[in-house]
Amino acid sequence: MTPPPRAARSYDAVIVGGGHNGLVAAAYLARAGRSVLVLERLAHTGGAAVSTRPFAGVDARLSRYSYLVSLLPGKIVRDLGLDFRVRGRTVSSYTPVERRGRPTGLLVGGGERRTRESFARLTGSDREFAAWQRFYAMTGHVARRIFPTLTEPLPTREELRRRVDDAVAWRALFEEPIGVAIERHFADDTVRGVALTDALIGTFADAHDPSLRQNRCFLYHVIGGGTGAWDVPVGGMGALTDALAGAARAAGAELATGHEAVRIDADGRTAEVTHRSADGEHVTAARHVLVNAAPRELAALTGQPPPPPAEGAQLKVNMLLTRLPALRDPAADPREAFAGTFHIAEGYEQLAAAYARAAAGSLPAVPPSEIYCHSLTDPTILGPDPAAKGMHTLTLFGLHTPARLFAGDNDAVRDELLQSTLAQLDAHLAEPLADCLATDADGRPCIEARSPLDLERDLRLPGGNIFHRELSWPHAQEGAGRWGVATGQGNVLLCGAGAVRGGGVSGVPGHNAAMAVLEGAAG
């Protein structure tokens, strides 16, 4: 725990929550000469974007919760002078399947020729690959038009439509369920499923959900960096938040860990934040309060009615292996297959069936998930000993497992789901994954799983929702203000994932809240 702030001092800005967005806001404001205090209830900053050694006695730093970078604008890295780098993955994805009784798979990456050949080998023609190129040319056009707007004042919906300047793409992404476009472009079930997965990460929805929540999720997954590429953070996700904390401190911001905000009182011009630590309760005055927490937490702090309940729908699993497992597909190199996103039970019909079963109140019979190996792209996360032994990390993200399914007995349901999820992976391996798991200093397998309820307990994510609430369209929303961070209380702003254009590891809400303060705008 860091010491409490000096008594009777008033700050230009108090930031509640030391996750990556709060740190971005702190660094921008402090660099602009504002006095800034960050209050973080945990013993460390970083929130969900941290690197930890979860396995006793094993020198491997895993990105424990969030693990890839797409939406972080290079502008923020440059503006704040961050010592932070990412590496691109040589393979986008590999999807193992069985066709006509034989193991095979779809490789996307490794160059256009290899990708084309993989599509042809799986589907029997060049048609699906040509459709793949057309589909992602469309999303690439949208990405180049929309991504730069994320750090600008919110455009209106019509302004954004004009900026996209493609009626077909606008209809496909903003007006019709994404399933319509996927089915229009692709005929193969595996290809359709791979395309759909970007619409379902952290989002419990069907391809044809009329709410279009799946479209909003898909949009954020394909616009990052103007390309949609998902990169690996060098040194793990904690390297980003450590760099942000360093930048904020260097600019003069005070970071107080072990301090939990419990109340915010604001009148539009001034505010007071009550916070508790091991040595008692404190009250700190500020001109502005920026809340890097979920809208539910904001409502509790300010005494406002709570927003609609949020719900997460993912299983998060971290593993350390003695070696990468061999695959049943003889053409697949594990070092290539696991370097990108390894799709498991994510055919189009499998995803629909898993959603339908979970929506009816049961765990998916065939749980879909996806895996990637951080250490293949960035071996720096492994210490000298595990690296010399050829160890590797695996991170698994399971889909269509809403928090409600864990309410009866979280531990038992999580364990059942973990076993059935790993069984789906084992079906594509030439050896059981269990034979490849490393053991920690106490002889226990190096594997940990987190349900949505675990994430709610550990990180206060409402219902375990990794986006804090449903993602929003990246254009003006009623009551969101000029920058998408307004709360209805003029000098209290939302700078977390629940802001408009929030979600993912982006720093965008932190940047936009800081701009609102510096501009004197009401969010």
Image (cartoon, rainbow, N blue to C red):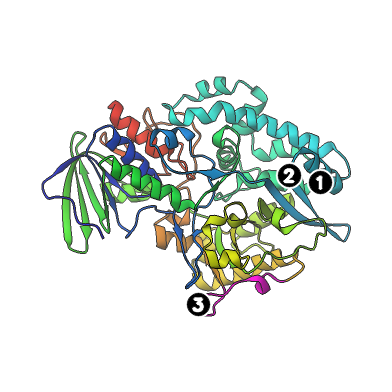
Q: Could you tell me the amino acid type at mark 1? A: Ser
Picture quarter containing residue 223? top right
Residue 172 lies, in percent from the top left, at: 65, 32
Residue in view at x 18 percent, y 37 percent: 270
Q: Which mark is residue 110?
A: 2
Relative placement, left or right, of 442 versus 288 is: right
| 441 in relation to 252, above or below | below
- Determine the residue positioned at 61% across, 68% down: 389
Out of 198 and 471, give the one closest to the viewer: 198
Q: Position of residue 447 (x, y in %)?
A: 56, 69
Residue 259 vertical placement versus 245 (above, below) = below
Provide the secondary structure element on which disc 3 rests.
Answer: loop
How far apart in space, not on screen, are marks 2 and 3 (Cα)?
A: 38 Å
- Residue 441's tag is 3
What is the three-letter code of the residue carrying label 3?
Answer: Ala
Q: Amino acid at mark 2?
A: Gly
Residue at screen point 66% across, 73% down? 434
Query: What is the quadrant of residue 3 in the picture?
Result: bottom left
- In which quadrant will I find the C terminus? top left
Q: Are marks 2 and 3 in contact (CB under 8 Å)?
A: no
Give residue 85's position: percent from left, percent from top.
50, 43
Q: Which residues are magenta?
A: 432-445
Residue 326 is one of the magenta-drawn residues: no
Q: Residues within 10 Å of mark 2 (few under 14, many from 20)?
A: some
Q: Name the residue that disc number 1 marks.
A: 118
Question: Of the residues under marks 1 and 2, which one precedes in the sequence?
Answer: 2
